[in-house]
Image (tube, rainbow, N blue to C red):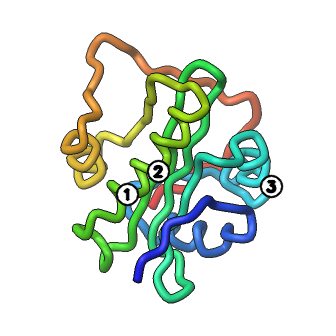
Amino acid sequence: MINIRVMSITDYDGVYNLWINTPGIGLNSTDDSREGIEKYLKRNPTSSFIAECDGKTIGVIMAGHDGRRGYIHHTAVLPSYRNQGIAKRLVDCAMSALEGEGINKVALVAFKKNDIGNQFWENIGFVDRDDLVYRNKNIHVLNRIDT
């Protein structure tokens, strides 16, 4: 049986193992470290979720907000558990949690080369915005980890 529950920092090792073994996820050694994820979860304690089966982490969604917009990060499901609705259940949990905190709109970033992920997001109603330019700038050097 698959159980979905709120993520805590004690889930970090299983979650990181899932991320590092999922093609299309982009991590960095600072923000996605145990300390970085702990900081994120403290700021957003009720909106990130994991899916478990027999005590093993098989899916994850990180979600949070800045008081105005919700954001989804690092959503992944183990390949052997895909096409069972797990990712959709995780998204539904995150969206419900964000709505409960007064958030009305949610954004995410997916790598262009992540065809599976982009198809999933499109299938569940997330639209591509061609009227925006995504930009970022590192404050500190971040070591990028692509899966």
In percent of width and height, residue 17 lies at: 56, 73
Regarding mark 1 in the picture, which secondary structure is present there? helix
119 is higher (above) or lower (below) than 8: above
Please name the amino acid that badge 3 sits on: Glu
Discs 3/2, front: 2
- Residue 89, numbered circle: 1
- Residue at (75, 60) in percent of width and height: 34
Mark 3 Cα-neighbour bin, 10 Å: few <14, some 14–19, many ≥20: few
Residue drawn at x 51%, y 32% is 99
Separation of disc 3 and disc 1 at Cα?
Answer: 27 Å
Which residue type carries mark 2? Answer: Cys
Q: Badge 1, how many Cα within 10 Å: few under 14, some, many 20+?
A: some
- Compared with residue 63, is residue 106 higher up or lower down, i.e. above or below? above
Task: Please state which of the two labelled residues, at mark 3 or mark 1, is closer to the viewer.
Answer: 1
Q: In this rendering, would 87 be left or right of 39?
A: left
Q: Based on the displayed image, in which of its 4 quarters is residue 23 positioned?
A: bottom left
Identify the residue position indicated by label 2 in the image. Answer: 93
Q: CA distance from mark 2 to mark 1?
A: 6 Å
Front-lying residue, 128 or 8? 8
Q: Position of residue 32 (x, y in %)?
A: 66, 53
> What residue is at 45 percent from the left and 67 percent from the top?
59
Residue 35 — which label?
Answer: 3
* Coordinates of residue 105 in the picture (x, y in percent): 44, 24
Looking at the rendered structure, the secondary structure element under dot 3 is helix
CB under 8 Å between discs 2 and 1: yes
81 to the left or right of 94: left
Q: Who is closer to the viewer here, 103 or 114?
A: 103
Q: Quadrant of residue 29?
A: bottom right
Q: Choose the circle earlier in sequence order: 3 or 1.
A: 3
Task: Compare marks 3 and 2 and give the one earlier in the sequence.
Answer: 3
Residue found at the very far front of the displayed protein: 100
